[in-house]
Amino acid sequence: MAIDWKDLTTFEISNTDMPAPWIPVLDTFEGKTHLQITAEGSWTVMGGSLAECGPDGLAGLPLISERLIVADCPVGALIGKIGGSSAAITATPAVPANSLPISDGKAFAIGSHCVTSVPEKSIGPLFIGFNCLVRPVKLMRLKIVIKGAIVPP
């Protein structure tokens, strides 16, 4: 089955400190059932105390899960959530692939490429963030392309 991905938005930001836990990047999903998210860029996390990383984070760097938003995702990785609040930073367990759809406001890994289902009856928004609790994130550049599709059950 071929999936007909349609562009929903491109989000770009650069040269800034990100003190907020979540950034809204897409208000609504226009009836799409699935999202395809690709990302590129670079930033430093944990107040700049760790090496620069990109969307896939610093894989292999051990960090206690209490300092991460998504426990089984590398520190610094690009993460997202659908619905909920831009201020909620409660660390939640990672979302196993077989547990989709994502419940409202539960954080999930995005990395450099992600395909995820939109929770039934969700209107949005899609937030992005970085997998660490310490702020600010020193953002050099970030470009996210979001596409959507209606995939029949």
Image: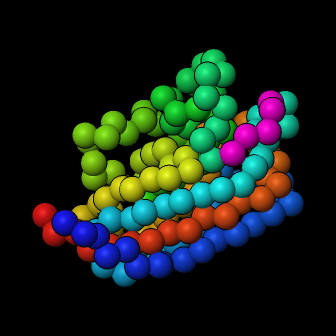
Count the numbered circles shown. Answer: 0
In the displayed structure image, the side of residue 115 where residue 52 appears, left or right: right
Residue sticking out furthest to the left? 153
Q: Residue at x 39, y 65 (%)?
A: 35
Highlighted magenta segment, given as a residue range: 50-54
Q: Is residue 29 left or right of residue 61?
A: left
**Can I make out residue 22 in this image?**
no
User: Camera-side residue: 91 or 3?
Assistant: 3
Q: Does the magenta stretch include residue 29?
A: no
Placement of 95 over or under 66, stated as above or below: below
Q: In which quarter of the image is the C terminus?
A: bottom left
Residue nearer the viewer, 12 or 66: 12
Q: Taking 6 as reference, is 121 above or below it?
A: above
Pick whichever, 136 or 9, lies toward us: 9
Magenta stretch encompasses residue 53: yes
Q: Nearer the viewer, residue 50 or 66?
A: 50
On the image, the x and y values in percent for residue 50 come to 80, 30
Q: Can residue 122 be seen in this view?
A: yes
- The quarter of the picture where the N terminus appears is bottom left
Residue 97: x and y, percent? 31, 40
| Position of residue 69 measured from the top left corner of the image (x, y, whole percent) | 56, 37
Quarter of the image for residue 89 reads top right
